[in-house]
Image (tube, grey):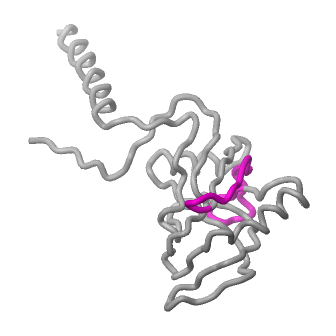
Amino acid sequence: MNQVWDVMKPFCVKTYQGIFSGYASTYTPDAVGDQMVPGAFQKTLWAWKKKKKRFPHVYWEHDIEEPIGVCLQLKEDEKGLFIQGKLLQDFPKTKEALQSIQWGRRGLSIGFFVQGCHFNGGTRCITEVLLKEISLVKFPCNSDAVVEEIKSISSCSYDAATQGVHRAFQRLYLKINASF
């Protein structure tokens, strides 16, 4: 019996728009013991919107020499820091980032300075940050910080993908047999 193990939710490319959304940070503890507290982003989001008239750029793996996109929307909600961004095709690393997302590596991460915190046991509870940048990463420190949706890519099932491959092999088989 053949079994397919669904280890990641695959994406199927349709057309490129590059608009993505997800959470750059959540209120769950991360791998190094930091936990954002609701409200931690309020002042920095206000500063980005009011003073700079834009949001931070999106980079590949926190490398400021590798910009890959822009933030269209940032807001703090009940889950964390929600982002809607756009991957820009003009940047060299954008293709790698898009391929990474397609194959299930959809991590997001933030670059920030801590402006306020307190400790609760071994957890640093961050109450205020100065947000510097947002990055697409292969291995996020906060496992809940991920791209949840990208326009031009939609969820598809292994069954649908398998059926398409099966039909292609059937056509190939028929062509090969017809030539004999």
Task: In the displayed orientation, state which residue is furthest to the right.
Answer: 51
Horizontal side of 116 relative to 5 (left or right) equals right
Q: Is residue 13 above or below residue 59?
A: above
Q: Residue at x 68, y 61 (%)?
A: 134
Q: Is residue 77 magenta?
A: yes
Q: Residue at x 63, y 88 (%)?
A: 118
Q: Residue at x 57, y 29 (%)?
A: 15
Instruction: Write down the region rendered in magenta.
Output: 58-80
Q: Is residue 120 magenta?
A: no
Task: In the displayed orientation, state which residue is furthest to the left.
Answer: 1
The percent coordinates of residue 21 (x first, y second) are: 60, 47
Horizontal side of 37 relative to 103 (left or right) equals right
Horizontal side of 53 relative to 141 (left or right) equals right
The percent coordinates of residue 150 (x first, y second) are: 56, 41
The percent coordinates of residue 29 (x first, y second) are: 50, 75
Quadrant position of residue 116: bottom right
Q: Is residue 14 above or below residue 2?
A: above
Horizontal side of 132 relative to 1 (left or right) equals right
Q: Which quadrant is home to the N terminus?
A: top left
What main secondary structure does the magenta stretch of the protein show? strand
Towards the viewer: 82 or 88: 82
Q: Which quadrant is home to the C terminus?
A: top left
The percent coordinates of residue 56 (x first, y second) are: 77, 59
Quadrant position of residue 63: bottom right
Towards the viewer: 46 or 175: 46
Number of numbered markers: 0
Q: Residue at x 61, y 44 (%)?
A: 20
Quadrant position of residue 169: top left
Q: Is residue 60 above or below residue 20?
A: below
